[in-house]
Image: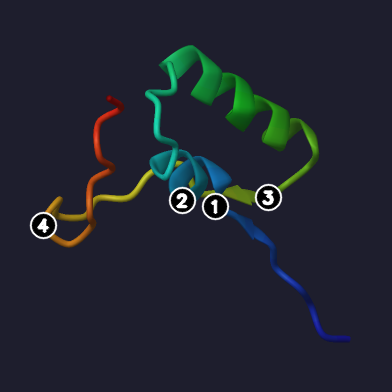
Amino acid sequence: MPSLQINEVAPRDGLQIEADFVPTVDKIRLIDALSATGLARIETASFVSPKAIPQPMPAR
């Protein structure tokens, strides 16, 4: 029987596109909530040169 693997990446990809700073306590709360759903793999961070990823414009 084929298997399926789900990798949750919202803490990694989703939070980096937010225009406003997300406090660490809120990030931890999100990761804990995702973990409580039974996900086996949650990607929380990546290590990439800032030159490779456009940074969001600061709020005015």
- Residue drawn at x 61%, y 20% is 29
The answer to whether 7 is drawn above or below residue 3 in the figure is above
Q: Are marks 4 and 3 in contact (CB under 8 Å)?
A: no
Neighbor class of circle 1 (other Cα within 10 Å; few <14, some 14-19, many 20+) is some
Q: Between disc 2 and disc 3, whose residue precedes?
A: 2
Q: Between disc 4 and disc 2, whose residue precedes?
A: 2
Residue receiving disc 4:
51
Q: Are marks 4 and 1 in contact (CB under 8 Å)?
A: no
The answer to whether 8 is drawn above or below residue 30 in the figure is below
Residue 13: numbered disc: 2
Residue receiving disc 3:
40
The answer to whether 11 is drawn above or below residue 36 in the figure is below
Q: Between disc 3 and disc 1, whose residue precedes?
A: 1
Q: Are marks 2 and 3 in contact (CB under 8 Å)?
A: no
The answer to whether 49 is drawn above or below residue 21 in the figure is below
Q: Tag 2's secondary structure?
A: helix
Name the outermost residue toward the right: 1
Residue receiving disc 1:
9
Q: Which quadrant of the structure image shows residue 31?
A: top right
Q: Please state if 3 lies on the left or on the right of 56 as rendered.
A: right
* Residue type at tag 4: Lys
Q: Are marks 2 and 1 in contact (CB under 8 Å)?
A: yes
* Residue type at tag 3: Ala
